[in-house]
Every structure is written in C-alpha cells, then in structure tokens.
Amino acid sequence: IHVVRVWSFITANEGFVLRTLDYVSYMMTAVVAALFVRRVDVVIATSPQFFTAIAGYLTGLFKRRPFVFELRDLWPESIRAVGAIRSEQVLSALERLEMFLYRRAAAVVSVTHAFRENLIRRGIDPGKVHVVTNGVDMARFKPMPRDERLARSLGLEGYFVAGYIGTHGLAHGLGTLLDAADLLRKNGQNNIRILLLGDGAEKESLKSRASEIQLDNVVFVDTVPKDEVIRYWSLLDASVIHLRDTPLFETVIPSKLFESMAMGIPILHGVRGESACIVEASKAGLLFETEDATNLCSQLIVLAGDEALRSRLAGKGPVAAQFYDRSALASHMLDVIARVVCKTKEPAISEASIDVGRN
C-alpha cells in the first residue's frame, strides 16, 4: 500500500473557524496530490468529516472514475446533536452538500443499518447503499491477563476497574462517568476505580471538574501509542461505552464495543438503539440508561460484586466478536468496490485505488 501524505493545518477540536480551516486545508491539498496518482480505478472517501468526501468527489470528477462514499457518521446531523454549530443557515447548507455527495456517489458504504435506513428515507437509491459495520482485529484483540505492572504504576492494583478508552469529546457525555464516580464514593464503594484514557475537546474540563470535587477514584491517562493501548484494555474489569442522550446516537455503533467483546471484557453500555441491540443479543454486557449516573453506579456495584456474572459476560464477548472480524468485513468492502468498478470499466479491478481519508 502506497500512502501519500499531504500538509494540512492542524488544530485542536476547539473553535469553529480553526476547525473548518483544518478540514478545508486537507481537502484542498488532498485533491491536488491525488491528481498526480496514476492508474486509478476507483476513488474512496471516508467521513467524518465530509470535506474528505468532497475531496473524493472532486478527484473522481477530474479523473473520470467512480467515487465511493464510506459513511462513518451523519454530518451535519452529528454537529447539530452536540451543538457545535447553531446556525440553521449553515447547517441547511451543509445538509444540501451532504445530499449532493450521496447522490453523486457510485456507492455509499454505511457502517450501520440505521444510517442506511436514514439515507433511503431521504430519497437515496437503496440499491447503492451498502452496510459494512465497524469490526475488530481478532488477532490483536483477544482475552489476556491483566498487566499487573501497569496496574501498580497507575494505583489500580487490587481494585475493580471500569474504564472508558477513546475520544473525550462533546458527543460522549463523560461527565456521567464522573457523576457515577462521585456516587460510588458517597456510597462507600471504595473498591471501584474508573479509568479514562484518551484525549479530546472535553478532556481538560473533565479533569478540572474531577479535581474540584476531589474524585480520588478516577484515573486520567493521556493518549498512548496504538501498540500500547492493548495493555490498558487488559486492566479493565468492565468497559464503559457511553454517548449523549440524543436520537442521532441511537443510529451509531461505537467501534470500542467490538474491541471490548473480543477481549472478553464485560460491557456497561449507555447508548440506545442499534448498538444496544448488539449487546443484548450477544449477552456480553449490561445496559444502563444514557446520561443516568445513578443507573450506571448501580450497574457498576452489581458487576463488581458478582464474579459469576462477570465471568458469564466475559465468555460471551469473544464468541459474538467473531461476527465482526475485520478480515470478513474487508472482503465484503472489497466486493462492493469491485462491483462498482465492474459497472464502469473492464477488467473488473486492477491494483490501484485512492482512499481519501485521514488517520
């Protein structure tokens, strides 16, 4: 795989103008760089954010090749849900652009069935909307013993550890976890610790609040290298998955759900909708009400006090995760791409494509 890296203006997820400049600068440099990539059969662009999709559309237009839109988030609806942009005029303009991109794409690959249904309700041809969900690398994420050395270094040795690993953003409502930690402390549940690993727009405000109310049962860890994350997963007796209480988030499936299942970590799931159905069907975790700290606190106490329940939930996870193995999902994605190319060019597919996306 040949990766072409381009310059973009990088800023933290703070402030509408700077963030927009970040997105637009990438779009422009990506289009220019893509023009110099030869032997292209198909252009694939992924969102969020959908300025990458604009780059993909323009690249496909210039090269006269089909454009595939991989839909990982509903922009701008997710912006509206978290209140990042409040101007209805701006949001309406973005929605018109969103629909234009869906219509111009040769195929749309959605990561959830709910996203697909949303597009179909809005008039997008069902025949070109496919579903390839998030998944997990089963070779990398699997049950493993706790890293006791790391647990000692973080002061977590001997405690029941419930953890959130991921972005600390506007959408995640992690204040609920702090509220639950406060309730645990007030209820004398001193055997439970909450680990928060990651970064994001809300990280500093969460740390400030925890300091203000003196939450000694919450441990914050900054982002660590990808190869190190697996060690932190091993510390968890329960994985907490949470998003804010808004209808849009009932349509998403957090990818950390599959990582938790593959590692055999019981899940405490605070997201309604499609992802909650996966947890219920797999029997790999317990549900709690979104943004309900009291309910989360209760479920933490139940799980911490019931070893047999933890063992049962942990055993179900790896079995269910096999249905979301990335190897199988990648084959499905490749099949969608090949069918798109077959409609526009013979032979079916050569070795070249452009994937417009940021990592």
Image: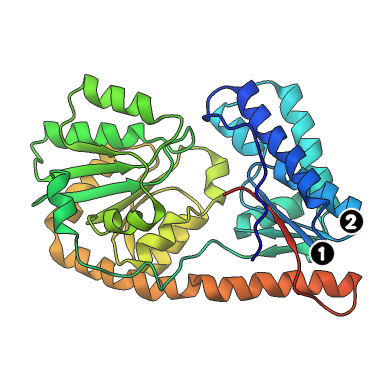
Percent across and percent down for residue 267 are: 32, 57
Q: Is residue 126 above or below residue 251?
A: below
Dot 1 corresponds to which residue? 40
| Foreground pick, 24 / 187 | 24
Instruction: Indicate left or right for 113 with 320 as reference.
Output: right
Percent across and percent down for residue 216 are: 15, 32
- Disc 2 marks a residue whose amino acid type is Lys
Mark 2 secondary-structure assignment: helix
Disc 2 packing (10 Å; few <14; some 14–19; many ≥20): some
Please tell me which residue is depicted at 36% across the width and 60% down the height of the picture: 260
**Res 92 → quadrant:** top right
Mark 1 secondary-structure assignment: loop
Please tell me which residue is depicted at 69% across the width and 51% down the height of the picture: 118
Badge 1 or badge 2: first in the primary sequence: 1
- Disc 1 marks a residue whose amino acid type is Val
Q: Is residue 352 above or below residue 186?
A: below
Residue 178 in view, yes or no: yes
Disc 1 packing (10 Å; few <14; some 14–19; many ≥20): some
Residue 156 in view, yes or no: no
Q: How is the image coloured?
A: rainbow
| Foreground pick, 265 / 246 | 265
| Foreground pick, 252 / 4 | 4
CB atoms at circles 1 and 2 under 8 Å apart?
yes
